[in-house]
Image: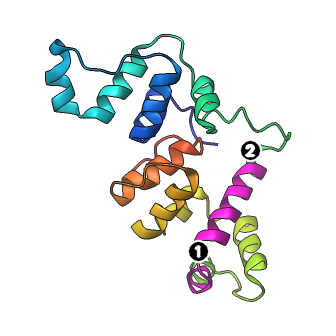
């Protein structure tokens, strides 16, 4: 599994709506005071609210997960599955729902794996080979597909391809990808 994720990384990956939801839940005053207006103007509303929430001592990633129904802390996985199993499930979901069969064939050929069998068999072959992890799968996706992944996860769908990839990785507990 990726490195530990910080509260700041979680806050930076959230949409404006999610940040406002957290602010309301934790009774954080997000109205800029007169002295804070230059910072609000310079950084923008989203970063301003993230900063205000981050300043509150004691709000943990687990607290944010409870309010937003997210899984940044990974503590909600109570099935006893190992990280490898959870990562394999995520890889399967990404490949099954967001990669078409032609692209899947290309992935298999790139990995020197057989393209035979059903889509499910092909995906299992990729996962079992251990040659393609979640970040690798996301790197092969274009902006349109990354936007669909973000939408399905309830994440902010705006930004560059790298921003979308990082947002997904942070949301899934991988930390920010090293680009």
Q: Residue 155 placed where, x, y %?
A: 49, 48
Q: How many marks?
A: 2
Q: Is residue 90 magenta?
A: yes
In this view, 47 is above or below 103: above
Compared across the picture, whether 5 is left or right of 17 comes to right
| Eye-nearest disc, 1 or 2 | 1
Q: Give the Cα separation between the discs numbered 1 and 2.
A: 23 Å
Choose the circle earlier in sequence order: 1 or 2.
2
Q: Which residue shows up at 57% across the image and 32% down it?
A: 4
Other residues around mark 2 within 10 Å, as few (<14) / some (14–19) / many (≥20): few
Quadrant location of the N terminus in the rendered image: top right
Q: Which residue shows up at 45% across the image and 62% down it?
A: 147
Circle 2: element type: helix
Q: Residue 179 placed where, x, y %?
A: 38, 51
Query: Which residue is farthest left?
Result: 38
Specify the quadrant of the image occupied by residue 12: top left
Q: Is 47 or 96 nearer to us in this picture? A: 47
Q: Residue 26 placed where, x, y %?
A: 51, 18
Q: Residue 94 placed where, x, y %?
A: 62, 64
Q: Which residues are magenta?
A: 85-106
Compared across the picture, whether 51 is left or right of 78 comes to left
In this view, 172 is above or below 6: below
Residue located beneath label 1 in the image? 99
Tell me whether circle 1 and circle 2 mark residues in contact (CB < 8 Å). no
Q: Which mark is residue 83?
A: 2
Residue 90 visible? The answer is: yes
Q: Which residue shows up at 51% across the image and 50% down it?
A: 168
Specify the quadrant of the image occupied by residue 136: bottom right
Dominant secondary structure (helix, strand or loop) of the stretch shown in magenta? helix
Q: Is residue 37 magenta?
A: no
Q: Which residue shows up at 42% across the image and 21% down it?
A: 53
């Amino acid at each position: 599994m990726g490195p530990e994720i910080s509260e700041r990384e979680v806050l930076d990956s959230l949409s404006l709506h999610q940040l406002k939801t957290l602010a309301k839940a934790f009774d954080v005053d997000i109205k800029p005071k007169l002295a804070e207006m230059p910072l609000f103007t310079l950084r923008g509303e989203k970063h301003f609210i993230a900063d205000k929430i981050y300043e509150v001592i004691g709000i943990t990633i687990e607290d944010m997960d409870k309010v937003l129904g997210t899984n940044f802390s990974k503590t909600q996985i109570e099935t006893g599955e190992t990280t490898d199993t959870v990562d394999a499930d995520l890889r399967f979901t990404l490949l099954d729902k967001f990669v078409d069969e032609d692209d899947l064939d290309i992935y298999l050929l790139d990995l020197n794996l057989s393209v035979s069998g059903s889509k499910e068999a092909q995906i299992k072959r990729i996962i079992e080979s251990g040659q393609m992890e979640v970040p690798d799968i996301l790197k092969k996706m274009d902006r349109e597909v990354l936007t669909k992944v973000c939408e399905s996860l309830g994440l902010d769908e705006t930004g560059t391809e790298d921003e979308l990839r990082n947002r997904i990785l942070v949301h899934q507990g991988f930390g920010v990808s090293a680009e």
